[in-house]
Image (cartoon, rainbow, N blue to C red):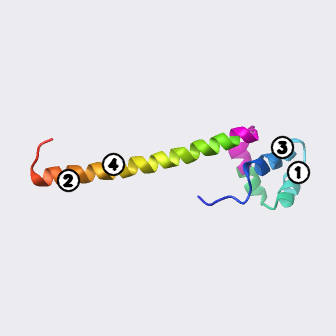
Amino acid sequence: MSKSRHTEAQMIGALKQMEAGRRAGDVAREVGVSKHTLYAWKAKYGGMDVSQAQEAKQLRDENTRLRKLVADLSLDKEALQSVIRKNGWSS
């Protein structure tokens, strides 16, 4: 996933402007993104405040780290089981 040029606070600030009644096109132009990006932010961060968005990002990062760890451990386990089978050792 690529790094965003905008912080969670900037994204939520743009969404708050839309909630206040500003047109999506005007907000998007001011922030420097497309309307599509603005609506993607709305799907991801709609209804959150800044602290909730930061916590969600931390949880996503931790989840990614844990998934990589599980994948590495699964590969290690498979390699060890292969050695056991190859040498004829029983488990």
Q: Quadrant of residue 29?
A: bottom right
In the rendered structure, the answer to whether residue 90 lies left or right of residue 33 reads left
User: Of callouts 4 and 1, which one flags the residue occurring earlier in the amino acid sequence?
Assistant: 1
| Local SS, label 2 | helix
Numbered badge on residue 16? 3
Q: Amino acid at mark 3?
A: Lys
Depth check, mark 1 against mark 2: the one in front is 2
From the image, tell me which residue sits under label 1: 23
**Which of 23/68 is in front?**
68
Q: Are marks 3 and 4 in contact (CB under 8 Å)?
A: no
From the image, tell me which residue sits under label 4: 74
Residue name at image x 64 percent, y 59 percent: 3
Q: Are marks 3 and 1 in contact (CB under 8 Å)?
A: no
In whole angstroms, how far apart are the C-alphas of marks 3 and 1? 11 Å
Q: Is residue 49 magenta?
A: yes
Residue name at image x 88 percent, y 51 percent: 23
Q: Amino acid at mark 4?
A: Ser
In whole angstroms, how far apart are the C-alphas of marks 3 and 4? 44 Å
In the rendered structure, the answer to whether residue 30 lies left or right of residue 71 reads right
Query: Over which residues does the magenta segment extend?
Result: 41-52
